[in-house]
Amino acid sequence: MSSLDEVDSQEHWFDGVFAAPHVQSFIELLIRRASEPRPLPPSVFTLTVALPDESGSRQGYRIVALDRPGRLGRLEVRLDGARSVVRTTNVRAIEAPAQGDIEIDGQAVPMTSGGRLVRSEDGVWSVSAVPTRRMGPAIQIADGRAAIVLLCDRAELDAAQCLAHGLHIYGLPRAHIVFADDALDHVRLLNSSNLIVIGPIELSRALGVSKTLWPPRASAEPVIELMPAVRVERDRFSVHRRVFDQPGYGASLSLGPPDRSGLLAMIPHPLNSALQAMQLAGTDAAGLERALRAFPLRTGTPVPELAVLGPDRRTGEVVAAGWWANGWSWSDATSYL
């Protein structure tokens, strides 16, 4: 319940405002409430999240990763003294406090210290320190948690400058343009920034790192994860098993001139798994421009982790869209191609 009190003949702020009777009564009420005992936290609660990275915790429990990104995940918790019973729906990893044994999906897991529980492919829960990838819509790459590096060849400089200008106009993180030939001179910046790769760049060669599979292995050597679901070359790219390299998909499907295709896809960060990276590409300059137009400069733009833009205007030029699986692989359940 709230109320609005006005003081006649006074400005918005004036001397003695806190001495007014109704203000004093409100302050005294807050002091009394602060000294009252707080109710005990509930022993039964449910967490429901769509984006784990943007969701918080309750009593030390938090959903860290979903089994199928793009769908809701649910964590039902019942606390019984030093023991807790947890049931999950579409959850791959959680964080839990240290409070004795945890029964999760019918499996007893000892928790001597707070940590992360991860479910394997065969459904077995265990304490694990293996990192889980950050998942979410494409707009998360510009959420302000880190600077942005636009990595490109000189042929894509105009596209990089266009995107950097858009980021500046909309008050998003400052963008640094780095040419692929000079990437080795900026490894420290790349290691602390979100990365947007524009055009066909072989990251392993540009950054001078070796290749390995996701998740990153424990090694002092920087690594770059393979992502077999996406391949980008000059004037062509492939997503899953489909290759995009043609000027159009048939004049009967297009209401305008036959334009080429653009790709916007979240990819693993090549140096820091805690940060995000994105690939922008096109089958030609027009296709790359189409991918740039899909970049979510404004909040509320519903661009998922993958989008391919083509000439079919019956679907708003969206040819493919969806969410990657946990291992950065193709997911038939949450994607369309």
Image: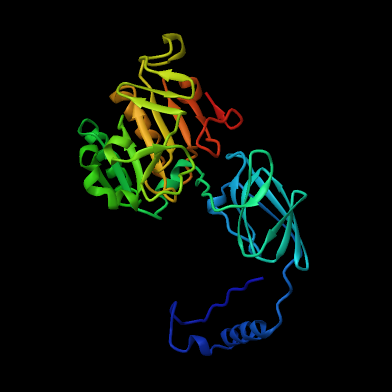
Q: Identify the image quadrant of residue 40.
A: bottom right
Q: Identify the image quadrant of residue 99.
A: bottom right
Residue at 52% of width from left, 35% of height from top?
324
Image position of 253 with respect to 70: above or below? above
Residue 67: x and y, percent? 62, 41
Residue 276: x and y, percent? 42, 46
Determine whether, in the image, residue 259 is placed left or right of residue 138: left
> In the depicted view, which residue is nearer to us: 110 or 37?
110
Determine whether, in the image, residue 244 is placed left or right of residue 33: left
Q: How many marks?
A: 0
Image position of 271 with respect to 60: above or below? above
Determine whether, in the image, residue 18 is placed left or right of residue 98: left
> In the depicted view, which residue is nearer to us: 173 or 301?
173
Residue 255: x and y, percent? 42, 15
Determine whether, in the image, residue 292 is placed left or right of residue 47: left
Residue at 23% of width from left, 34% of height from top?
153
Residue at 50% of width from left, 30% of height from top?
321
Residue at 71% of width from left, 81% of height from top?
37
Q: Tell me the quarter of the image containing the N terminus.
A: bottom right
Residue 6: x and y, percent? 54, 78
> In the depicted view, which residue is nearer to us: 163 or 31?
163
